[in-house]
Every structure is written in C-alpha cells, then in structure tokens.
Image (spheres, grey):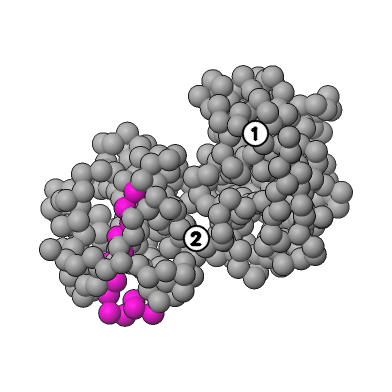
Amino acid sequence: MTHTHFVPNHAGGACADTYERPLMTNFTDLGLNAALLKAVATEGYSVPTPIQVQAIPPALTGRDVQGIAQTGTGKTAAFALPILQRLGASKSRPAPKTCRALVLAPTRELAGQIAESFRVYGRHTGLTVALVFGGVPKPRQSRQLAAGVDILVATPGRLLDHLNDRAVRLDCVETLVLDEADHMLDLGFIIPIRRIAALTPAKRQTLLFTATMPPEIAKLADGLLRDPVHVAVAVAATTAERVTQHVMFVDTSAKRGALRDLLAKSKGRTLVFTRTKHGADRVVKYLDEYGVPSAAIHGNKSQGQRERALADFRSGSTRVLVATDIAARGIDVDDVTHVINFDLPNVPESYVHRIGRTARAGASGVAISLCGPDERPFLRGIEKLIRAKVPVLLAA
C-alpha cells in the first residue's frame, strides 16, 4: 500500500516533487541496514518521526532533500542514518586530508551534538567522524583531518581556517549537509557556505534542513540542490503546537522583578533568552543575588564554560540557563518546561526557534515573553510571522 505524499515547493524553485512512499510506522520499514537498526534500537527508538519517515527513504537513494522542520523533530537522524548507510555500503576509505560527507552547522554546540549522533548511530559501522569548530586550538583538529575521515562535522568559520591552512580538501565529498540553514543566514555564513560548496564536487548529494525559509535561504537552496525532494513536517514559521504562549507588557526597568516572580512560580527547568551577551551576564548576576542558581551561555564564554553550563543545566543542578540566540542552537534538553524571553528578539524567526526549545520529545511547555514599550514593534513582527496573536498574561 502506498501513500502519495505531495510536498510543497518551499524553495520557490521549479515544480514541486511528488514522492511515493509506503506508510511506515517502524524504523524497520525505512530500508535501513541491520547495523543502523541495532544502533537505533539501543537508543530506544522504534517509531520514526515524520521528518525521518519523509526524508530517509529518498536520501537513501541518493536524492537531494530539502527539509523544513522545527527543532526537536529528529532532523539529525533524518540525514545521519542515510549518510551512514550509503558510506558504509562502499568499501572505499577516505584519502588523507579528505572527507566523504561534510555536515555544516551554525554553532559549536550543535556541531558537537551532530558529531555525537553520528558516532552513536554509526557505532557498528566502523566509519570515522571528525568535529571541527572554533574556540579551541587547531593543531589537534588538523592531526585528525590528516588521516582522512568519513564524516566531517564543522562550523563554517573554522572549516575555512583549515581550508586556508590546506589541512583539508573537499574534492572527495559525496554528501553535503546544511543543518539549520536559516540560522547560518542570521550569522552571516551564506557567503562562506557558497565558497565551501564550490570546493565540493558538482555531482554530490546535498541535504538542506531549516526551520524557516526566508527568501535568502530559498535562493541558496535553489543554487545548491538538484531536483530535490521537498519534505515539511510543519508549515514554515509555525510554533510548536504544545507550547502555551503568553506575553507580559512590563516597563523595561521592571523586567528583572517580573522574571524573578515567574521563576518563583515555575519550578521546572527554564531557558531565559536575552538579545545580548552582556544582557545575559547581567541577568545571571541579578538572579544570583536573589539566590536563584543560574548560568549564562554565549559567544564570549570559553568552550569549557559553555560545556559546564550546559551539563549543569541537563543534570538539574542549575535549573535556569540564560542564553543568547546564537549560543542556544545546540541546546538539546528534552525537559525544558519554560522558555522566558527576557528580551524579545528583533528577528521574528528567532522567536520560533526560541520557544521550540520547550515542548520537545512529545512534552508540553510554556513560553512567556516580557515586552517592554520599545519592543512592541518586535511583537507585531512575531505575530505577523506566526499568524496569531500571543495571549496577554497580566502580572500578578
């Protein structure tokens, strides 16, 4: 029995693709080999997510895929599993200073998560994985690249450093992955991505995943993808269905007190967003003065500080993590109960990403935004993007 799945062409390119796929309810239905099925079973996975159901079969055949999905929907497995299977089916080994699959991610945290997922899913394949990102010395990364790796996960800036040092070359890349492409746009990585892609073979498989599809990403996708299968598990720029959203209108000077009151009422794990790094540090200092254990994670923190803050947040020893948008990419914690926007984002799409950090893995969550008088235009932009009014929550 087959199900005709029509996928809209969100990239704005040629005609949308219609992909015939069987109805699938189990990982064993996806065409994955025994080594990968054993790995996902060990992780406790049995039922694939919608993005995995739609993306894995065409990716296994070598098709280009453009996937639109919010965070927490299983995107990493949707591209990692088919890459591992395709690379494992070939007995060829990577030449020195080359990689066979290249995955680009916007932040160190997300890159680290992706690399770990490849290692976990590929534990029975014998394939090698390397991870390169900034903030740490390059020599150790260069030594790992010297032998050649099957899968390289990298942030664009550090990869360009290694390319400039001739520590790696990309002429053997069989599959190129762009994860969270819209956030790479936010960080100014579009030109570096085009430069990196130009160094890979023209005949390659490309997999592009994004939560939102601004025009610049649609243009990038059109330039990189060949006859792609378009898959979407949610309309672009929609917010998680299980997130209860509220906005509180408060004076800027009253935000800290409002945050303290909200944290006193919510005993769960809470992620607080600020627009700036210094703003994050100020919030942590304020919370510490009131006896609320918290930590900040942002670009000015060392890699060790970021990892410790995230580990404490995951373990529950710190229940409040204060983050900027850039640093929050890669925070993959299933039981975040609350997201509080101490500052509203000035980029509406960031709101979607922020509140997507709660209500993960089937859970529900609450997102509360503190809106100062000068942030009203930001709120209007958010409501226009999500096509809904955010309910007003009155301060106690």
Q: Residue at x 52, y 62 (%)?
A: 237
Write the start and end of the magenta stretch as one range: 365-378
- Quickly name the residue at label 2: 238
Q: Residue at x 39, y 50 (%)?
A: 242
Look at the image and say whether residue 349 sits in the magenta stretch. Answer: no
- x then y, percent, for residue 235: 56, 59
Q: Does 376 sit left or right of 383 as displayed?
A: left
| Mark 1 neighbour density, 10 Å: few (under 14) some (14–19) many (20 or more) | some
Location of residue 67 with respect to 101 vertically, above or below:
below
Earlier sequence position, callout 1 versus callout 2: 1
Secondary structure state at the residue bearing disc 1: loop
Secondary structure state at the residue bearing disc 2: loop
Marking on residue 335: none
Residue type, label 1: Met
- x then y, percent, for residue 315: 32, 33
Residue type, label 2: Thr
The residue positioned farthest toward the front in the image shown: 1
Location of residue 41 with respect to 58 vertically, above or below:
above
Q: Residue at x 25, y 54 (%)?
A: 284
Q: Residue at x 38, y 65 (%)?
A: 275
- x then y, percent, for residue 49: 56, 39
- Evaluate whether residue 243 shows in this view: yes
- Quickly name the residue at label 1: 24
